[in-house]
Each structure stands twice: as structure tokens, then as C-alpha cells.
């Protein structure tokens, strides 16, 4: 059933890895530059720009890939026509996403209990699954913020993915650091010239963080493919 989605996921994963490899090569080129010296102002500027580019691009690639996996999986499951009750309980909450969101600002109280009933009886709901697909807004269960380890912990829990999101602690630590760097660069939290002066932000450090995110992405693809092939989204 999921052959095309599995293939597309693997291809998108390979694209992410290829682009991250390009970033690592770029960082290595800067790191090994003949004029690479802490006292060389031009090298310092180039090294700073290279790290900023690597951070922004790497995090953007990861965000695009995570969104792709979620949206394309939602599209395929929605097209299955399977009833909500067939899906694992943790995933049903996404089927009721629109209902939960509408309860935030519901002005017509005559519909309040109807919506509450729907959201609390999903285990017997015969409606076809309709998982949310957002184009202009944050894609549930993501929230539109810079990706951090807790986003993937949430994904693993909601979808019921096998194994652990971060079997190696360094993967989560690197993602957390890259998220902080990304926000410092994108939002001007501190002056640009100061962003990479702190400990743990050398060219070699950023190169290592990009590599960790690449390895995590390989794990994400493998886990997602296993999940789809085993139909892990269905109620056990």
C-alpha cells in the first residue's frame, strides 16, 4: 500500500543528506583555509558567515523533511477510507484536531456538547480518518517553531513510532544547539558578530552538529519506513 510513499520518503531523505554533505564540505573548506587564523579578520568573517549559512540551511532542510513525512503520510492515510476507530488511540487525537481547535473559540454553545462527544468517543467513530494537512499554517503536530528534540519526542509518541527518537544523546544535544544558533541568527537575539564567539560554536563544532543531524535523519527515515510497512498507525 505504501510503496510510493516509502520510496518518496527515502528520496527526500537522500536529498537532505546530500545537502547536509554539501554544508559539511563547505565548513571543512573554511576550516582548512590557508589563512584560517583567529587573528585574521577576513577569515573570521568568512567562518562566521559559513556557520550561519550551515545552521540556517540544515535546520530548514530538517523542517522541510519532517513536514513532508507528516503531510504525505496524512494524505495517504486519509485516502485509505479507514474509519477513525481503526487507528491507534494516540493518533486519533490528530483526527480530532479541527474539533479541538474549534473548541478554543466556539461561540455557538449549542454545538459545544456535540463537539465534545465527538472528541471523546473516537474509539467507536466510524467516520473516515481525516488527518490535518496545513499549507499556510503550522503542520500539526508541529507548532511552527524551530525544531527541537521535544518536537520529535512528540512525533514518536503521537504516531507510535518504534524505538526511541534519540538513541544517541549527542543527536538530541546537537539539534538543541542548532535550534539555539538558528534563532540567534534569524531573530537577532544577540549581535551577529557575537553569535559564534561562545564556546561550542567553532567551525568544527557546527560541522559536527550538522553531521549529527544527518545521522538522526537517517534514523528518522528508517523508523518511518518501518512504521509504514508494519502499519504501525493501526490500533494494535
Image: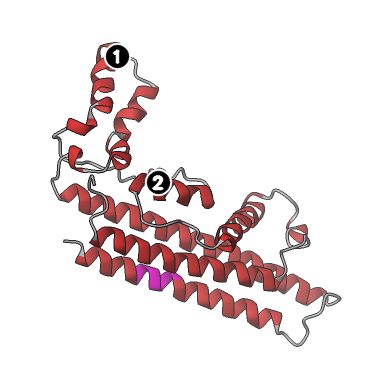
**Magenta residue span:** 11-16
Where, by quadrant of the figure, is residue 212 drawn? bottom right
**Depth check: 228 or 59 in front?**
228
Outermost residue, top side:
110
Counting from the top left corner in percent of width and height, residue 224 is at 34, 60
Residue position for label 2 = 157
Q: Residue at x 33, y 40 (%)?
A: 90
Q: Is residue 130 left or right of residue 10?
A: left
Most prominent secondary structure in the magenta stretch?
A: helix
Counting from the top left corner in percent of width and height, residue 199 is at 77, 62
Q: Is residue 101 above or below residue 55?
A: above
Q: Are the residues tagged 1 and 2 within 8 Å (C-beta)?
A: no
Where, by quadrant of the figure, is residue 14 drawn? bottom left
Q: Is residue 122 left or right of residue 49?
A: left
Counting from the top left corner in percent of width and height, residue 26 is at 60, 78
Q: Residue at x 51, y 77 (%)?
A: 21
Q: Tell me, yes or no, whether the highlighted magenta stretch contains residue 95.
A: no
Q: Residue at x 26, y 59 (%)?
A: 228
Q: Is residue 14 left or right of residue 184?
A: left
Q: Tell me, yes or no, whether the highlighted magenta stretch contains residue 15.
A: yes
As helix, strand or loop, the secondary structure at mark 2 comes to helix
Q: Residue at x 15, y 40 (%)?
A: 83
Count the marks: how many? 2
Q: Is residue 146 left or right of residue 27?
A: left
What colour scheme does the image use?
A: secondary structure
Q: Is residue 129 above or below residue 152?
A: above
Give residue 108's mark. 1
Label 2 Cα crowd, 10 Å radius (few <14 / some 14-19 / many 20+) = some
Measured in 3D between alpha carbons, the distance from the residue under mark 1 to the one under mark 2, in whole angstroms, is 33 Å
Query: Tag 2 or tag 1, which sits nearer the N-term?
Result: 1
Where, by quadrant of the figure, is residue 196 drawn? bottom right
Amino acid at each position: 500500500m505504501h510503496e510510493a510513499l516509502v520510496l518518496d520518503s527515502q528520496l527526500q531523505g537522500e536529498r537532505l543528506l546530500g545537502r547536509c554533505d554539501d554544508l559539511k564540505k563547505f565548513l571543512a573548506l573554511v576550516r582548512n583555509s590557508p589563512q584560517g587564523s583567529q587573528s585574521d579578520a577576513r577569515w573570521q568573517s568568512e567562518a562566521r558567515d559559513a556557520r550561519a549559512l550551515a545552521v540556517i540551511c540544515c535546520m530548514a532542510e530538517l523542517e522541510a523533511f519532517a513536514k513532508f513525512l507528516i503531510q504525505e503520510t496524512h494524505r495517504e492515510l486519509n485516502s485509505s477510507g479507514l474509519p477513525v476507530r481503526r487507528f491507534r488511540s494516540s493518533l486519533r487525537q490528530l483526527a480530532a484536531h479541527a474539533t479541538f481547535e474549534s473548541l478554543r473559540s466556539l461561540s455557538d454553545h449549542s454545538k459545544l456538547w456535540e463537539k465534545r462527544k465527538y472528541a471523546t468517543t473516537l474509539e467507536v467513530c466510524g467516520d473516515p480518518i481525516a488527518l490535518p494537512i496545513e499549507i499556510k499554517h503550522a503542520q500539526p503536530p508541529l507548532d511552527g517553531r524551530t525544531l527541537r528534540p521535544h518536537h520529535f519526542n512528540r512525533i514518536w509518541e503521537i504516531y507510535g513510532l518504534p524505538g526511541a527518537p534519540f538513541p544517541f544523546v549527542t543527536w538530541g544535544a546537537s539539534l538543541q544547539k542548532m535550534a539555539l544558533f538558528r534563532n540567534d541568527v534569524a531573530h537577532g537575539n544577540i549581535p551577529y558578530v557575537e553569535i559564534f564567539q561562545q564556546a561550542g560554536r567553532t567551525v568544527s563544532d557546527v560541522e559536527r552538529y550538522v553531521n549529527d543531524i544527518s545521522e538522526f535523519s537517517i534514523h528518522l527515515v528508517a523508523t518511518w519506513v518501518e512504521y509504514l510497512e508494519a502499519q504501525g498507525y493501526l490500533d494494535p
